[in-house]
Image: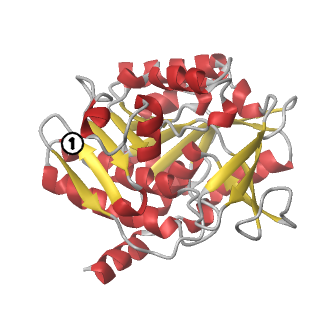
């Protein structure tokens, strides 16, 4: 086995609160001025991105144990991204380089309210070319939680690698965490996206979706609980719907409710959902009784809401990720 990325990663693996994130990491080019189209933008700020990688960094920044599994171009951007993982105390032993493909790029348009639109360059990028044979399944099996999105399901060979990693995790009794992270420009069509995302729905123990994603997946009103509950299935431990700055709703077998969000000055919503998920997974990895104890779950979700809110106050995802102290600060100020 390759050496761990750093000392923090070694401690992470030993503690078995390890969360392994699988999927894509890329470079986001974010306009230096909000509210302009890509064509109108005069300059762009280079920022590391990719939801599963953001989650891994969020976990480490909150003092949790995380590792990332994915493939990068053997280019300057690819090496830069893996170095960023290591600098953020993420175990990078599951990271591979491809000499024949580039690291993925995304150009992100920031609207005035901090919401985003994406244009991707990945035809194919290295993350899409990860094969089942290249996977470090030992790392996956060591995890307490295996976290993934849906972008890795779009094309082969990465889809097969994703399925193999998920099967290995489930067979080893690892909790499976799914945040579909709908990115329609990457799928052949909206119907293909819906079908692909739902194809692995019932493999997960925990699912987080945004209100927009509920509307997309159910073709209905995300505020109507009947539509949300159409996404529930026997065996799911927790379904969380994030409602932007309004907070989140939660559903388990035994209880359901909502936890209000925090008001902040939003600059860029990139990574807010990932900060939320990372924060929740830190708590799940430490103590999965959270699925059965509503008081503990509500406390964890309040903390996750604070983490998501803080992440919107700066540009880019990873640089804006909160620490435990900044999240506790926001909660204290709101009380």
Q: Is residue 11 visible?
A: no
Above or below for 40 versus 314: above
**Residue at horizontal 62%, vertical 18%?**
132
Q: Locate residue 305: give its quadrant.
A: bottom left
At label 1, counting other C-alpha atoms closer than 10 Å, the crowd grade (few under 14, some 14-19, many 20 or more) is many
Above or below for 33 versus 168: below
**Residue 321 x, y percent position in the rendering:** 53, 64
Relative placement, left or right, of 55 versus 40 is left
Identify the coloring.
Answer: secondary structure
Above or below for 59 versus 307: above
Q: Is residue 154 visible?
A: yes
Per the image, label 1 sits on a secondary structure element best described as: helix
Task: Count all numbered tags in the image, as a single digit.
Answer: 1
**Residue at horizontal 52%, vertical 18%?**
164
Residue corresponding to mark 1? 291
**Residue at horizontal 47%, vertical 70%?**
310
């Amino acid at each position: 086995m390759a050496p761990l990325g750093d000392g923090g990663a070694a401690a992470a693996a030993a503690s078995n609160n390890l969360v392994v994130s699988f999927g894509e990491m890329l470079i986001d080019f974010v306009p230096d001025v909000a509210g302009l189209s890509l064509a109108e933008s005069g300059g762009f700020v280079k920022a590391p991105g990719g939801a599963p990688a953001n989650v891994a960094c969020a976990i480490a920044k909150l003092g949790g144990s995380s590792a990332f599994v994915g493939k990068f171009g053997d280019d300057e951007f690819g090496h830069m991204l893996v170095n960023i993982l290591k600098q953020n105390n993420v175990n990078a032993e599951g990271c591979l380089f491809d000499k024949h493909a580039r690291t993925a790029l995304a150009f992100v348009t920031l609207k005035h309210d901090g919401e985003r639109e994406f244009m991707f360059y990945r035809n194919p990028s290295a993350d899409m070319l990860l094969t089942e044979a290249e996977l470090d399944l030992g790392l996956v099996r060591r995890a307490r939680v295996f976290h993934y999105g849906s972008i890795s399901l779009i094309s082969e060979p990465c889809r097969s690698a994703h399925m193999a990693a998920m099967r290995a995790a489930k067979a080893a009794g690892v909790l499976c965490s799914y945040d579909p992270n709908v990115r329609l420009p990457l799928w052949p069509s909206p119907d293909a996206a819906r079908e692909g995302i739902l194809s692995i729905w019932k493999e997960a123990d925990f699912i987080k979706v945004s209100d927009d994603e509920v509307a997309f997946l159910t073709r209905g009103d995300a505020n109507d609980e009947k539509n949300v509950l159409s996404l529930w299935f026997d065996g799911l431990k927790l379904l969380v719907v994030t409602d932007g700055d309004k907070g989140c709703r939660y559903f388990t077998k035994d209880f359901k409710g909502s936890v209000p969000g925090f008001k902040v000055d939003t600059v860029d919503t990139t990574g807010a959902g990932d900060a939320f998920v990372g924060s929740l997974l830190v708590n799940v990895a430490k103590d999965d009784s959270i699925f059965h104890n509503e008081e503990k779950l509500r406390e964890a979700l309040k903390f996750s809401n604070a983490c998501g809110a803080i992440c919107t106050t700066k540009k880019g995802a990873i640089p804006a990720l909160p620490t435990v102290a900044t999240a506790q600060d926001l909660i204290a100020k709101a009380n």
